[in-house]
Image (cartoon, helix red, strand yellow):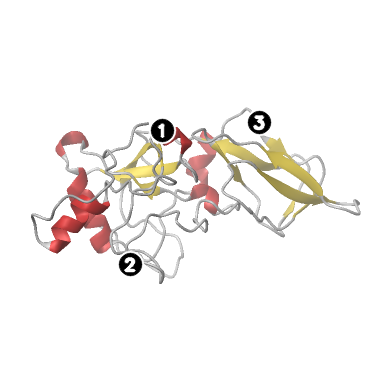
Amino acid sequence: MPYDPLRQKGPKPPQDPLEIDLVFNIRPCGTCDFFWPKDSSKQPYGPYPSYDFESNTPAAHVPSGSSSSFTWVEGVTRPPAFPDAEVMDGCRKAPIMTIGINPNLTAFAPNKTAASWCYPSFSSAAGSDSWTKYAYYYRYRSVYQEHFDLSFIEQFLLPDGRVKAERPGMMMELPRPSDSPSYDIRVQYDGDSTPTAIHLPGTLGEPRYVVLVDANAHFGKGDLLAARLNVPAGRKPR
């Protein structure tokens, strides 16, 4: 899909207070050709599941108990995308950064939790304003990363190319040494003296493979180890 908003190679001259100017110049930033190539289908890292607010400033849910996973805001899915640049939500290396300058993306790591991570992709649908949503999100977001329930994404695992366990065994460590959409997972089948490598082919711009078994976790014969994920737009997670 085309960039929304369109990328700009340089910031526009400031005409508003800094905090407003920051929003209008950071969100469409496309200075880095590596992360923002002219052809958006050639973007590394992704595309990832994304979501949108249904109103400009949605009411947040106050988490209860000590659960590490809770509903904080309701939304609707958007087409898979590469995350926009963030405002004042970076790491020690930069206060303003594009998610993905580090390959250490939450959704990049191959594990069961990473399969469900999602990122904001704001639109101006139904009379809302994507810029207001963007500013609101980065003003009030927490330190926690949004994700869909695994039970929600399971319905969007594509049937072709699924990788199932031939025999019982254990998932080995899952390093990803490069930004390539293709990578290998290794499993140790019961009774084998050496691990078995399983290649997960990937193509930039196409639905990516997600791993559905954590490292060092056991699985049974026929269990689903990995599959390609494509969460469509317009769905409301519950």
Quarter holding residue 144: bottom left
Q: Is residue 37 above or below residue 215?
A: above
Tell me if mark 1 has few (under 14), some (14-19) or many (20+) residues whose alpha carbon lies within 10 angstroms of its own.
few
Callout 1: helix, strand or loop?
loop
Callout 3: helix, strand or loop?
loop
* Residue 202, percent from left and from top: 60, 36
* Residue 13, percent from left and from top: 14, 52
Disc nearer the start of the sequence (1/2): 1
Q: Is residue 18 above or below residue 15?
A: below
Residue type (three-letter) at the residue carrying disc 3: Gly
Residue type (three-letter) at the residue carrying disc 2: Pro
Q: Is residue 234 above or below residue 58?
A: above
Q: Which residue is mark 1?
A: 39
Of tags 1 and 2, the one toward the viewer is: 1
Callout 2: helix, strand or loop?
loop
Disc nearer the start of the sequence (1/3): 1
Quarter holding residue 238: top left
* Residue 124, percent from left and from top: 20, 38
Q: Which residue is mark 2?
A: 95
Tell me if mark 3 has few (under 14), some (14-19) or many (20+) residues whose alpha carbon lies within 10 angstroms of its own.
few
Front one among 141 and 3: 3
**Quadrant of the image for the N terminus?**
top left
Tell me if mark 2 has few (under 14), some (14-19) or many (20+) residues whose alpha carbon lies within 10 angstroms of its own.
few
Q: Are marks 1 and 3 in contact (CB under 8 Å)?
A: no
Of tags 3 and 2, the one toward the viewer is: 2
Of tags 1 and 3, the one toward the viewer is: 1
Q: CA distance from mark 3 to mark 2?
A: 40 Å
Q: Which residue is mark 3?
A: 161
Q: Is residue 212 left or right of residue 42?
A: right
